[in-house]
Amino acid sequence: MQKLNFFRELRRRRVLRTASIYVVGAWLLMQVADIVFPALEIPDSAMRNLLYALTAGFPLALIAGWYFDITKNGIRLTRSTDKELPPLILEDYAMLAVVVFVSGLIAFTLWPEPESDISIPGAVAIMPFEDLDDSGAIGTSLSGEIVNALKRVPGIWVPGLDSSTHYEGSDPSAVGSALGVGAVLRGSVRRVAENIEITADFHGAKRSKRIWSLTLIVAPGELLEAQQEIVDAVIAEIAPSATERAATSSGTKQEACAPIYDVYLRARQIATTPGRRAFEIRARAVKLLQEATRDAPDCALAWSGLAHAHFNMAPQFRGAERFEQGLVPAGAAARRALELDGTLAQAWIVLAEIAEQDSRFIDAESHFLKALFAEPTNALANAMYAEALLARGRVQDGMHYALEAYRNDPASRDVAGKVAMAARMAGDGDLAVEFGQIFRDLSQQAVYDGFLDIARGHMLNGDIDSALEEYRAHSDRTSDWFLECVEAQRDSSMLPSIRQRLKAAVTVESDVGYNAWWIIVCGTWLDEADLVLDFVFGNDPDQHITEAYYFLFFFTEADALRQHPRFRQFVEEKGLLEYWHTVGWSDYCEPDGDSFRCR
């Protein structure tokens, strides 16, 4: 009997044609699925299962192609022919099995593993949860607490909520690209009768595909437990090797907070709501948090929130009332929070800011460092400490912490402003322009858009034309006399008239925080240190925050002010000299025996 020509038989039975049609059809089906599945929010696992099914079907298609043939009369068994070839023997069937097995193995081995949609493991952005009704809104504050919990987990990086809010509504891939994260958590909150429904959707940032979705319906007393369930689900997805749970703080985990957690979240969200009725809104938040601390006296989070709410109320008062109605109760609440949980950065920040207001700079330094020890990636703690350092003349240290705040909250308008300010004080024109522009890009419809930082950066670089262009584009917020002062830096014939205009400006300007640095720039350039200091110390200090005065002395151009006897007296009276001796010296001043000298 003639030995079978196996490959001629494959061709006669049209097996190769069947295999080709199957491969092309499977490829087309995968392309269609790659388009349709994301649109229908079908998870990635379905795509992988389809791939496995098509791979498993390939040998079945080959077997079917061997035994069956598609004709115009339908599907029929392929006829064997003894005239041309003998029937298959065991050896032939074995060879066919080997071919099928090897083909499947090669396809399975060479087909690329589906890439994870989490492009940067351990980095996730938490978007503000949407409130689907106005009754007891807690979406944004719930997101903020999830951020705080995740920041405590080693191996996880979460940008601040300011950055997430800036990109609210953007596609997850756009959020990932802008913030440098590999995943995005979105969600919504609504009231359902007496319960709260929370929906959380976890998306990979690479292709914006939803990886999982979680819906929880809980009673208000179970809200803290539901939050932890979401946090744990995020950890399991982005950092499964994390050795600690998210909420390592007893203030977050303690059972005492559970009964009032809904009230706490509502109060925190109310306290951050923008609007013209700021005093009324903040007073409402204080009232809710006072109720929470009465109902749950051992909940550290409620006391910390109350401290922050009281502190935010302080600017609404004047004179002694600012301390009695704002700072004193804020300090008491912060200390109670820290008795219950010494790792709450927010409470340490409140105490640090109160110490700043009271010129207790060494205490403030200690409180800021404790806040950063508890939460090193807390953008607010880094930014506020940076501001304090700048006000003490430690400009380079302030720059370091401002940049650290920016690293942890890269789309925060306030943080970008801190970096721009530090750059101006350090005399770094390029950095001032760069972060002034970042500030502008983040400002949207804000009244101030960073033009002072950008213009001042140009001036530091000696680019007077660009500085004037920036100032003139904001003529409604720039004094005419200051524009002339800038022009006079390249036209000495204008100096006599500018001196007169500067003296006139000192008598009418009152806002130290906004306009004083213009007077310093112009006044020091014209060697009018006495005039400038008369302006600075002649204003009612109760009308401005204490730090506004300190910043003025630590710009590079303020050397004449730092060398003035009145500055020396100011440093000694305010306790700044003791701070320098104890903590660290200003970039512009150094010890000189028992005294000091500045440049």
Image (cartoon, helix red, strand yellow):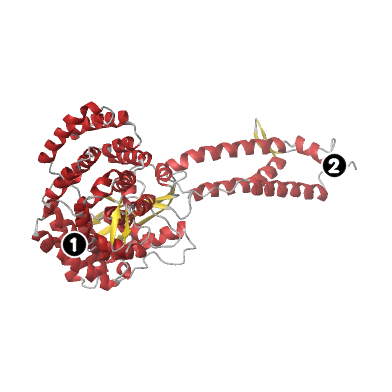
Task: Identify the image quadrant of residue 142.
Answer: bottom left
- Residue 556: % across, % down: 31, 45
- Residue 325: % across, % down: 11, 62
Answer left or right for 114 relative to 189: right
Question: Which residue is the site of mark 1?
Answer: 358
The tag earlier along the polypeptide, 2 or 1, is 2
Query: Relative to the observer, which residue lies in front, 276 or 246?
Result: 276
Decide: is 432 above or below 547. Answer: above
Examine the rendering and report whether any part of residue 249 can be seen. yes
Question: Which residue is the site of mark 2?
Answer: 4
Q: From mark 2 to mark 1, how far is it between C-alphas?
A: 101 Å
Decide: is 130 above or below 12. Answer: below
Query: Within 10 Å of the Cα at label 1, are there few (<14), some (14-19), or many (20+) other Cα atoms?
Result: some
The residue shown at (67%, 36%) is 20
Decide: is 229 above or below 466. Answer: below
Q: Amino acid at mark 1?
A: Asp
Q: Residue furthest right?
A: 1
Task: Identify the image quadrant of residue 11.
Answer: top right
